[in-house]
Amino acid sequence: MTDYSTSMRTDRCGDLRIDDVDRQVTLCGWVDRRREHGEHLAFIDLRDRSGVVQLVVDGAQDLRSEYVLQVSGIVRERPADTANDSLDTGAVEIDAAEVTVLSVAEPPPFPIDERTEVDEVLRLRHRYVDLRRPRLQRNLKVRAQVNSAVRSAMEEQGFLEVETPMLIASTPEGARDFVVPSRKEPGSFYALPQSPQIFKQLCMVGGVDRYYQIARCLRDEDLRSDRQFEFMQLDAEASFVSQDDVLAFISHAVLAVTEAVTGEQLGEIPRMSWHEAQERFGSDKPDVRFGMELVELTEVFAATEFRAFQAPCIKGIRVPGGADASRSQLDDLTEQCKLWGAKGLVWMRVTDKGLESPVAKFLTDGEQVRLSSTLDAEEGDLLLLVADERRMVRHILGLLRLELGRPPVTEGGLNFLWVVDFPLFEGLDDVGNPISAHHPFTMPHEDDLEVLDRGDLLDVRSQAYDLVLNGWELGSGSVRIHRSDIQEKIFSILGIGSTEAHAKFGFLLDAFRYGAPPHAGFAFGLDRLTAILAGEENIREVIAYPKTQSGADPLTSAPTPIDDRHLKELGLRVLPPAE
């Protein structure tokens, strides 16, 4: 058991139990609540990071909320009729013989409890007060458990922690870089790393055959509930490994983290191909906790005379018990689908008399029967259909499925899923060159190397993989290209010439000339994993000092202008805002 005693305290507030009765203790903490009991006597809840304990204090009139106290007294058993079963310390109280005020406090800007809803900007402006709340204390503890378990899991698998630089050259990643002007070389800039990708691959060339790092990464992209400018990730790379090896390494780590936080031992993480995920769930990060899967209906309407269903692809979802949706609700769903890019949405209620829908009259009896059978429709269900190009159909129904059925992120248990066999290319650019779905160093699937020569580029699979938890993408990785012949072919297909390749990736390509081992890696977001394990829908609740959704920091007022002297020193001039 950890010894928390110091020169100022013998114990922590939340650690005291019935076995401590009759002990003399000294505690330090904040006044959580005060309850008067007679003219002079008061009950005070004293709070520190471990929890709260009740003090019995004589002459407590001057002790106010959030005062910082040092208290010495005897641990007593509470009378049976006053014990508090909801508190870990609820069986005891401290008969406080000596109370010292270490610091007085003004009334806090908001109540420090879980019962009061507080504006987020106000909370972040006074984050040092917000952090005292039990919820935030618990979340930071979970985060520390996650980091500790990650380190232990990686090190027991032989990984070496290596720190990579924060000031680097700008690299062509998916988001915008945050840049730092150089005082020594005016007009030149460093970039803050979006990931340690290049450096961890250089570690492989350098013989560090198993690297990991809890890395801070920065991306200048729009914020949302699962995204911040700054984020932490478990970054890993290994040499002489296959995709299966990397999935095993990372599975061991996330399962160890889950057990450390929840005490729950989960089984092997299942796998699903990218193609199957898209066909069944309309997403490359499928939430498999609930049904409403996408069902293929193209063959059902192969010979239809209904023009709206004369499309390359038709799919549908069944909403159990959804037939009671009103017409206005269905109209709203239709408009929402159009905003997402659909041409329309067909809805059908399943009644005791058959299918009720504005389009039912355009379908034959046989089509209606086959439709109900294929969707396993039952009376009281709602059927929703989309007809269009396959990519669009999957996209719309995938979003609609989440809109109608997705539970809160913490309900239904923890459902990890590996999504594998991503496409190597995600589409074509304006001049017809394919676009890398991951990055240009991703190894093609071994069975699809010949497809590269046939020209069916959008059919080529990659050795790239994502880890998904309850519909959140935790992270991604891939087997890297280490063979120069394959790399040159990929660059050629992407329309990247030798000059451009060396301008963008020169120091990595140069390093590969000196013996690059086969290697593969992965990175997953610790903020996202921690949020789910802590039962939070927003990663801001598991970050000590987050930004708002607009990117502002109410605590320090960042971002702020810098003075002209500093600009001149850096050789910079700020242009007026564009009109």
Image (spheres, rainbow, N blue to C red):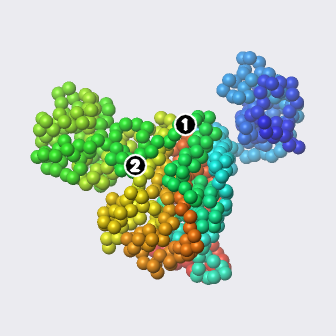
Residue behind mark 2 = 273
The x and y percentages for residue 259 are 61, 38
The x and y percentages for residue 134 are 66, 39
Nearest to the observer: residue 405 or residue 415:
415
Q: Is residue 412 above or below residue 144?
A: above
Q: Secondary structure at mark 1?
A: loop
- For the C terminus, the image quarter is bottom left
- 263 left or right, relative to 443: right
Name the residue at 42% across, 61% down. Answer: 444
- For the N terminus, the image quarter is top right
How far separated are the C-alphas under marks 2 and 1? 21 Å
The type of residue carrying mark 2 is Ser
Q: Sort mark 2 into few (<14), some (14-19) or many (20+) by Cα contacts within 10 Å.
A: some
The type of residue carrying mark 1 is Leu
* 2 or 1: tag closer to the N-terminus: 1
Q: Secondary structure at mark 2?
A: strand
Q: Is residue 78 above or below residue 321?
A: above
Quadrant of the rendered image containing residue 2? top right
Q: Which mark is residue 403?
A: none
Nearest to the observer: residue 459 or residue 187:
459
Quadrant of the rendered image containing residue 77? top right
Q: Single out the residue that lies furthest toward the top.
A: 80
Name the residue at 49% across, 59% down. Answer: 479
- 253 left or right, relative to 49: left
- 409 left or right, relative to 564: left
Q: Sort mark 1 into few (<14), some (14-19) or many (20+) by Cα contacts within 10 Å.
A: some
Residue behind mark 1 = 266
Name the residue at 31% across, 71% down. Answer: 432
- 56 left or right, relative to 259: right
Question: Is the C-beta separation of discs 2 and 1 under 8 Å?
Answer: no
Q: Is residue 102 above or below residue 459?
A: above
Total tally of numbered discs in the picture: 2
